[in-house]
Amino acid sequence: MDNEHIKKIKIFDTTLRDGEQSPGASMNIEEKLNLARQLARLGVDVIEAGFPVASEGDFEAVKAIAQEIKGVEIAGLARANEKDIYRAYSAVKYSEKPVIHTFIATSDLHLKYKLKMSREDLYEKAVGMVRYAKTFIENVEFSAEDASRTDFEFLCKVLEGVIDAGATTVNIPDTVGYATPFEFFNFIKSIKERVKSIENVILSVHCHNDLGLAVANSLSAILAGANQVECTINGIGERAGNAALEEIVMALDVRKDIYNAITNINTNEIYRSSQLLTHITGISVQPNKAIVGKNAFAHEAGIHQDGVLKEKATYEIMTPERVGRQSNDLVLGKHSGKHAFKEKLESLGYLLNDKEIENAFIKFKALSDRKKEIYDEDIDSLIAKSHPFEKYELKYVNVVCGDTVTPLSMVKVMVDGELKHNSSCGNGPVDAAINAIEKIVNSKAKVIGYEVKSIRGTTEAQGDVSITIEENGVSITGRSAHTDIVVASAKAYVNAINKLYIHNSNLKKSVESEIYE
């Protein structure tokens, strides 16, 4: 590798914005803050914290992240209009390094059918709104939505206009994942050669995965001269998702001979970031997912096992430890004290106050009474499922079931401080428990997804349950873990109902705000 020409690639993480747009991946403020803290530990350069104008909840989340997270650029997304831009500014202005990220589509397809604008009108809008954003904040990013399907000459004209207006970053999105790697390489290379003053700004790319090419296109763009990539943890996002941060970063790390590029990412935090996102959203990665999948470093074939035992490099191009996947056996147990527990939390990257540690320790002791061995995944589960406010809290669940009786469940749920109870039958113990809870919370949401897995593959392991519910076209995923599958399922359902309540409350506030304005 030519050390004199090593290129620094900025990592713009949009897990909290584009990633959250993945169906069922919505997060509340505390969950967003928790993930933002981890992204800062991971070492991303930019955290796109949300879309502040979308709802009151999203605005408050972006504001909270801007106020707390230090040393990282905090971006807020905004359409190219004054209302969105001012709302984004109002949220990110508390950051040490605030960014307004404004966008508008530039392809003729979007101009004709979505925006109903001429090219001339769009050019004036893009340039004018970048100039408007610059009156608030120095660091302004402009994205030409659907850039890969935009007339090249017109795209260059728009990019030159927004750069003249003060944009510090110009982003080239492959919004619908239409481009191919060789094509995208030439596209970015041509932009570098054609656009005036492009060398004075950050050239960014944002690739989607509709054809499974998001990472390949992003890496091709880096070879062509892009110096920022926009990506998400686990590749979550709209439709088929975004370019996966962990795959881009490790490709650059493992193949330095090809890319001659580095990032600020602390690769030891990659797996922890992936696991935390999975716990928060309930969206698991497939076992064969690169870098963070369960089988990414597993070897079953005899030839592979023999080779790895003799020399790991025969079948591993990176070590599990490089991405933070150190194996842990017995870590904590019922005899562990609070000091040891606190040290473990800090080693896992959780920075909690004394009250939060006390609450987590109580849950830990209760869990350690039920199982002999406590693993890192158990601790993750205990921490990740806490919420700043819960309208509904499951207090009690009991089921009667067997092969000769109809399953019956009795539950007690705290609703706004009032304890309510009910019972119901079902096709099974889990169905009965959910039916009983439905009667109490009076929910119209339908359960459309149910998944259960063992956190560790033993009979005493916690059951990790994800339940996805849907109401009025909105899908929400709740998650919980417990040594009793029925209890885990009931808690996961209540978790989903709480998330849905928060979503509906934020939506109502947003609608009321629109009416008022």
Image (cartoon, rainbow, N blue to C red):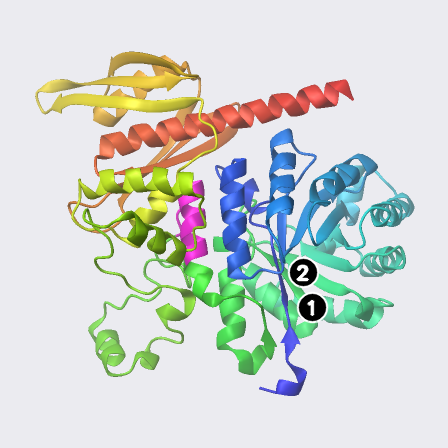
Circle 2: element type: strand
Which quadrant, please, contains the C terminus? top right
Left or right: 299 with respect to 36? left
Q: On the rendered structure, is 161 left or right of 340?
A: right
Name the quadrant containing residue 138. bottom right
Q: Residue under circle 2?
A: 205
Q: Up-down: is 20 above or below 73? A: above
Residue 504, image quadrant: top right
* Span of residues in magenta: 272-285
Of 490 and 287, which appears nearest the observer? 490
Label 1 vs 2, first from the N-terminus: 2
Three-letter code for the amino acid on which mark 2 is drawn: Val
Q: Position of residue 155 (x, y in %)?
A: 82, 57
Q: Residue at x 89, y 46 (%)?
A: 128
* Inter-mark Cα distance, 1 to 2: 7 Å
**Residue 267 spot, x, y in % from top left:** 47, 66
- Report the number of numbered marks: 2
Q: Outermost residue, left direction?
A: 404
Numbered badge on residue 325:
none
Which of 389/505 is in front?
A: 389
Q: Are marks 1 and 2 in contact (CB under 8 Å)?
A: yes
- Report which residue position mark 1 lands on: 226
Residue 381 magenta? no
Q: Is residue 275 magenta?
A: yes
Specify whether residue 244 is in view: no
The residue depicted at 63 percent of the width and 62 percent of the height is 229
Question: From where the camera sits, is residue 160 visible?
Answer: yes
